[in-house]
Amino acid sequence: MSEIIASPVASGIPARIDPLSASNISPARVRQRRALLVASSDIRHLPAMRRFAVGTLTLWGLPAEFTSDAELIVGELAANSALHGRSDLTLLLVVEAGAVHITVTDSGMRARVPARRPCADPEERGRGLEIVKALSRRVRVVRGRSYHQVRAEMDLPGSESDSYAMPVAS
């Protein structure tokens, strides 16, 4: 089954946001926002997952520099999940406590994991989680009996530990 279900959920904001007024929202003052995307574990869904993340974070008023890093994180985590998980995977975006949490969960390892083979070009594969760690404040990996979850935390622009500081007008 090849299906994508998207459900943006926002706490304390209208269900429909005017993109023009969204740019006036100060990300540092947001209490909590959530967006959820459920897709079958199929690499063909990766572009849609990246677009969902960028579109959602843009509507929430986050700057392009931030959303491009988030897009890279989503792409890496979702690709790993699609390649190594079974059936469905979920992408959860949460803004809270000065951070954006990007969580990708899948239904665990496939019954038979293919053996690792040396890549023809070692520079091309195997760097995804390292990229995610470099772009994130914190990365947490949880393996349960029937699921595998990776959560990356990025500082929210305007927060105290912000690496995406907005220029201050003088």
Image (cartoon, rainbow, N blue to C red):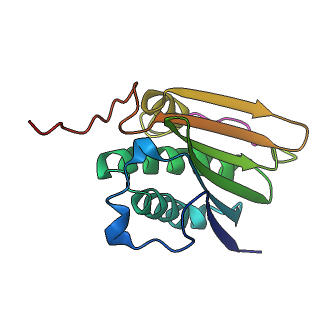
Residue 48 picture location, percent across and down: 53, 67
Q: Is residue 23 left or right of residue 97?
A: left
Residue 117 picture location, percent across and down: 63, 36
Question: Looking at the image, is 121 positioned above or below residue 65?
Answer: above
Q: Is residue 92 magenta?
A: no
Question: Which residue occupies 65% across, 29% down?
Answer: 140
Question: Which residue occupies 64% across, 69% down?
Answer: 6
Image-quadrant location for residue 142: top right
Residue 158 picture location, percent across and down: 35, 36
Image-quadrant location for residue 14: bottom right
- From the image, which quarter does the C terminus lie in? top left
The mark total stands at 0
Question: Which residue occupies 40% across, 32% down?
Answer: 159
Q: Residue furthest right?
A: 145
Q: Is residue 111 left or right of residue 117?
A: right
Q: Foreground residue, 123 or 78?
A: 78
Q: Which residues are magenta?
A: 114-118
Magenta stretch, overall SS: loop
Q: Is residue 23 left or right of residue 77?
A: left
Q: Foreground residue, 21 or 121?
A: 21
Q: Foreground residue, 157 or 148?
A: 157
Q: Foreground residue, 69 or 45?
A: 69
Question: Looking at the image, is 3 positioned above or below residue 88?
Answer: below
Residue 143 picture location, percent across and down: 80, 33
- From the image, which quarter does the N terminus lie in? bottom right
